[in-house]
Every structure is written in C-alpha cells, then in structure tokens.
Amino acid sequence: MSTERITRLKSALFEAQREISLERALLYTESHQQTEGEHTLIRRAKATAHVMDNVAISIRDDELIAGNRTVKPRAGIVSPEMDPYWIEKELDIFESRPQDKFFISEDDKAVYKETLLPYWSERSMKDFINGQIPDNVKEAVAEKVFSVNQTDKGQGHIIIDFDRLLEKGLGALTDEMSTLATVNADNEFYQSVLILLEASTRHIRRYEALANQMAAECECPVRAAELTRIASISANIATQKPQGFYEACQLFWYMNIILQYESNASSLSLGRFDQYMMPFYQASIGQGESPAFLQELLESLWVKTNDIVLLRSSSSAKFFAGFPTGYTILLGGLTENGRSAVNTLSSLCLDAYQSVQLPQPNLGGA
C-alpha cells in the first residue's frame, strides 16, 4: 500500500496538461552555434554540458529523489538535431492528434519556426542519413514500402554500466578519464567523455545548492530536514561513491536524467537493478535505516520513471501510444555460477511496482 507521499507524487504527475518544452533544444542549439568546425563528439559533449549547466531545475513538493528533465511534470522535449522537419509539420496538430496529445503555445511555435528549424535544416541527422540513401530507396520510402530510419527522437537501446558508476563514483571515473584524455590528447572520445563527467558533477551540485536554498526558505521543519538531506546526499555523490541505498538511488536517477538531456531517447534501460543495488540496500539496513523508508524511496524512484514521456511523431505514436519509454529492468536470473540471483530487493521491486501501479519501469525476469 503506497504512502500518502507516493499518492501525492503520483497525482501531481497528471494534474496539468502535457506540454512541449523547447528549453533543451534551444540550449543544445545555442552551444552548437558556438562550436562550428569542432569534432562532432566534442560538439555533442559541449552541447549536453551546456544544457546541464543552464537548464532550469526544480525539486517538487514531496520529492525525496531529486532530478527532473523539465520543471513541469511529463513535458515532452524536442530533438531538432535528429529531424527538425516532422516537428514543423505537426506544430498545429500536437494538441488534437489521436494519440499522445501535447500542448505547445503559439509563442513557442514561432520560436521553433524562426530559431530552431532554420538552424537545423540541412544540419540534422535526418539530412546526413538522407545524403547516404540512393534515390530508388528514397522513392520506396516515400511510397511507404518500408521505413529506413526513425529520427523523431533519439533511439537509445542501451544499458550503461551502473555497477561501475555506483561502485566507483563520479569523482573516480572523472579522474580515470582525465588521465586517459591527457595520455591520449588526440582522442576526441576521451575528451568528450571528460567534458560530460565534469558537467555531470556541476549539474548535481546545482541541485545541492537548490536544496539548501529551499531548506533555508522552508517554513515546515520536516520538509526543511528532507531538503537538507537531499543537499547533503547531492554534495557527496557529486564526486564520491554512494554510501547506502538513498545515495545510490539518487545518483542512479541523476544519471538517468543526464542521459535524457544527451539523447532524448527511449529504451535507456536500467539493467539488473536488484543485483547492483543490493549491496547499498544491505548497507542501509545495517546502518539502521527503516525498511519502510527504503521502500518509499524505491516507490519514489518508480514514480520518477513515469515523469519521462517521449514526444513522438504522429505515425510513431500510433505504434507506441501511452508513452512506453523503455525503462526496462531485469530482476532475479542467475549468478555467474548458475545459481539463483533472486534476492530481497528483487521482491521489493515487484512490491513497489504493484503498489505504485504505473507502467514504468517495465519489470522482467532474467
């Protein structure tokens, strides 16, 4: 049975109409305009870092886990660097189309047409792909014989190494990448990853500052204490490895938001959550943390996954209606030695899913 906090967090997700936010697109574009001529990897890293450094952030009422892709709940974001053309064609039907409706203001429509579309026309991933496709294939695509690519947003379909992130922490990973980037000064990949790791730390510290500010201004002592703890946790995990389940959940979610800023993609899957999170859960229990509170943290995390909705084209929305974002996790399965890997957290994940009763994350057994 969900706590009153979880019930309120769920309700808050659906109180207002879904909107389209141009903020990420505008910041991403602003950076690209300043990096003409640089290597593609460096440009993309700098653009994502620029988003993290400047995007508006918030900690909403009742939240124990901080980190929001947009200030308003369940807002869709656009990726004109992928394909700017379909968005322009659908600006006037987002609010009335059959599946997955979104509101976009007239002012934002004008901004898209006057600022984003002109810049990304002939610079987008769609343009690059079309430049490689023979005319006969283009004709077949136009006749809808088949589809070659889906560029209405990023594609994702990855599982990052959460084990390594949580076991080492951002500071150690940054130091490791700094060494690699120094030794391999001509390797743009190392340079770009270093840019993103450093920006990730700065982004988390922005939440630390926000939580401290909100705590100082909060008149409710209970909520002020919660905000102070969010600030303290953020300060630690900005560079250090997590100490306990709360810190692990918070770093885990910050990184998921950062991945969304980077690619606005589906199927950024969560991997074997119960395996890499179990040591942190055990640590918190050993430190005397309440199992009921840890369960509320887990349910808070499940609610957060439902805050991410993907803005798809009308044709894509027909097949993916209802915002399945692909936050898929695997529970149980086998160990390296072929034994059952089911643990306490496996069951708690299922309990949290049943309690929250929202579609994300998708739970599966390995």
Image: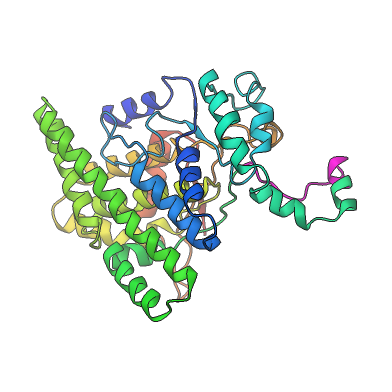
Query: Observer-nearest residue: 2 or 323?
Result: 323
The answer to whether residue 230 of the structure is visible from this angle is no
Q: Is residue 55 magenta?
A: no
Q: How is the image coloured?
A: rainbow
The answer to whether residue 84 of the structure is visible from this angle is yes
User: Where's residue 96, x and y in %?
Assistant: 64, 18
Q: Is residue 97 above or below residue 131?
A: above
310 lies left or right of 123: left
Query: Observer-nearest residue: 64 or 287?
Result: 64
Give the prevailing secondary structure in the magenta stretch: loop
Rendering quarter of residue 317: top right
User: Where's residue 32, x and y in %?
Assistant: 50, 49
Residue range highlighted in magenta:
140-152
User: Where's residue 81, x and y in %?
Assistant: 59, 46
155 lies left or right of 38: right
User: Where's residue 10, x and y in %?
Assistant: 38, 28
In percent of the image, x 50 and y 39: which residue is there? 25
In percent of the image, x 46 and y 51: which residue is there? 47
Query: Observer-nearest residue: 314 or 341?
Result: 314
